[in-house]
Image (spheres, coloured by chain):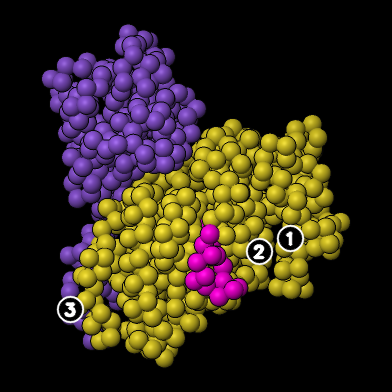
Amino acid sequence: MRYKTTIDGTVYGFADLKDLLAKATPERSGDQLAGVAAEGPVERLAAQMALADLPLKAFLAEALIPVETDEVSRLIMERHDKAAFAPISSLTVGEFREWLLRAETAQRQLEAVTFGLTPEMVAAVSKIMRLQDLISVASKREVVTRFRSTIGLKGRLSTRNQPNHPTDDSHGIAASAIDGLLMGSGDAVIGVNPATDTADDYIRIVSLLDELRARLSIPTQTCCLGHVTTAMKAIAAKAPVDLVFQSIAGSQKANEGFGVSLSLLKEAHEAVRSLGRGAIDASLMYFETGQGAALSADANFGVDQQTMEARAYAVAREFSPLLVNTVVGFIGPEYLFNGKQIIRAGLEDHFCGKLLGLPMGVDVCYTNHADADQEDMDALLTLLCAANVNFVITVPGADDVMLNYQSLAHHDAVYCRETLKRPPAPEFERWLLDIGLIDGAGRLLEAPPKLAGYLADARLLGA
Amino acid sequence: MADELDRKSAVSIDLREMTQARVLLGRFGAGLPTRAAQSFLLDHARARQAVWSEVDWASVRAGLVDLKLGIVEVESQAGDRATYIRRPDLGRKLSWQATERLADIRSDYDVLIVVADGLSASAIDTNAVSLARAIVAHLYARQLSIAPLVLASQARVALGDPIAEIAGTRISIVIIGERPGLSAADSVGVYVTCSPCPGTPDSRRNCISNIRNGGLTVGSAAIGVASLVVDMLKTGISGVGLKDASMGLPRD
């Protein structure tokens, strides 16, 4: 036993680093499914106490998944910046938590250590932080990205308008996107998860979204969330591709399960840049992640799901994405059983992503086989706003009619703007004001004549 | 409440005619109108019920028996619904009794069709029989041989892999109840896999989803499935590589 804690005369031992991390993880069904979780609350606390005494340096000495067989482990070790790590290199995980919480540790200090931190260090410290800790630290870490809108400014909340349709019908997608726009949603991206998977459909979807964006001069981006290889075909055909999307995970094998590798992502990134649709500093990639993705592909290698999730962020930050979001409650109750587990995981993912320098958003969501409901989403959304989340996803009436799960409603973004005082990206806020959708105080108004005129024409979309 | 929204009047066309999504719900501040809020809660209650019900297998069997393919009923190692929800790993493994029952069907068929409950009993109750029959008709039209039909309970998609391995078929078609949504608790998905065996990654499967009244029709889905099967038999490939591999194939 490499790691030990003694509580009331009982010695709790942990075989190795990944065993210690897994047993220190707050309870969740996915780790129990994987057979790596602590047996009970006392063993969990023993692991958390041992973890608190562990030097951060220990994570540089031992890769959780061998570098010889895993390109994500190699990437993590290669990108570690010793100079950036220097100010915190002598700390234990417990001391690192205290350093993060100190008032003196602000944006400048957090930004400076970004590439000195590995996903494992960040995951480790999150395991000994309660929700309030996760919120107060994350809220200090501003990560701003730009394309046509500026996303992630402190005190603002952007939204992805997700106008999915069960058969990718052009009119259906347009109707849903317009409904979202009328509710003031879509400054992070207007992004469709396609039900189809051909390059022709991909091109049709990005073209109709681009037409909508251009005709209304909306300062935002559009995206079809098809596979990266489909996106590359569309780019080769010179389709209006603003952002390349891909689902990613924290091990090479899990990414192979998604049909991607680091080299393929690099190729896609270069391809989308070649279209020249954004300014030189524009970010052009969009990633989604979620705890449990690696385990569901049998590619977790005995590592707990939250640490695997943080490792996916090492993949994401390699490509300077515009947007990253965890689809936290989508994967189902075998990974996050109920509202309590989903809420904690959402805040953990946001915290870890931000510390690693990612423009982190969250799809605040759940499925009908999970023990969760819209009240749990109210709680998570409110907590995420306190944590300064970059963006959330909204759909009509919280009901995604293509993916069959519940996300947030466009209404929930109105709640954030008007009750929590979180306006959208400044460019989009100006657009809402100019077109007459909000008043000077940011309050949503009725559909203005300018938009109503456009809507009369909307049936032409995609025709 | 003159300043509250009823945008219907301001918009010259009705977005509700263009999508079944919950568009133009109206609002009071950030809140939903009471009726819309309660309608959502009712749909959620129904969806949860779909997850926790059992398929009426007797009626599925009755709807398929005249195809004269033979029918074998199997179950996974997840003994009940509660275990099934928490333990997808068990839902991918055959019970040993089921393995024994399947031993008799071993032969070299081209295609195996599995009807699996998945996460929605009502999806299978509503759509599985008509979809399975339509797929069988398309496969027969292409002179393909079909193994006895397998009805699988407490089953995940990957339960098709050990079944196909025992049956020795080149292609597996798993018709499965999808995770219910609010407006669609009866949606079926079909997963088609070439050379299926335990451990097959999801990237080696092709999926056609949202098959239901109001989504993709049974007829279109069956055509899509048959075309995938034909491409897989010609190329020996399924999953993300299939599109490219089948690009040069002549279409029939």
Q: Are marks 3 and 2 in contact (CB under 8 Å)?
A: no
Is B206 placed left or right of A451 in the picture?
A: right
| Quadrant the C terminus of chain A occupies | bottom left
Q: Which residue is mark 1?
A: A115
Residue type for callout 3? Ser
Relative image position of residue A429 (x, y in whole percent)? 45, 82
Q: Are marks 1 and 3 in contact (CB under 8 Å)?
A: no
Q: Which residues are magenta?
A: A271-288
Q: Residue at x 31, y 20 (%)?
A: B110
Q: In which quarter of the view is residue B73 placed?
A: top left
Is A364 placed left or right of A303 in the picture?
A: left
Circle 3 Cα neighbour tier, 10 Å, few/some/many (<14 / 14–19 / ≥20)? some
Q: Disc 3 to disc 2, how far (Cα)?
A: 45 Å
Residue type for callout 2? Gly
A32 in relation to A306, above or below: above
Whether A153 is among the magenta residues is no
Relative image position of residue B46 (x, y in whole percent)? 26, 47
Give whichever of A421, B250 is nearer the camera.
B250
Circle 2 Cα neighbour tier, 10 Å, few/some/many (<14 / 14–19 / ≥20)? many
| Quadrant the N terminus of chain A occupies | top right
Q: Residue at x 44, y 44 (%)?
A: A332
Chain A color in figure: yellow
Give whichever of A177, A413 is nearer the camera.
A177
Give whichever of B217, A410 is nearer the camera.
B217
Can residue A237 be seen by looking at this rendering? yes
Q: Which mark is residue A357?
A: 2
Q: Which residue is mark 3?
A: B12
Residues indicated by labels 3 and 2 sit on the same polypeptide chain: no
| Chain to which the residue tagged by mark 3 belongs | B
Q: In which quarter of the view is residue A359 placed?
A: bottom right
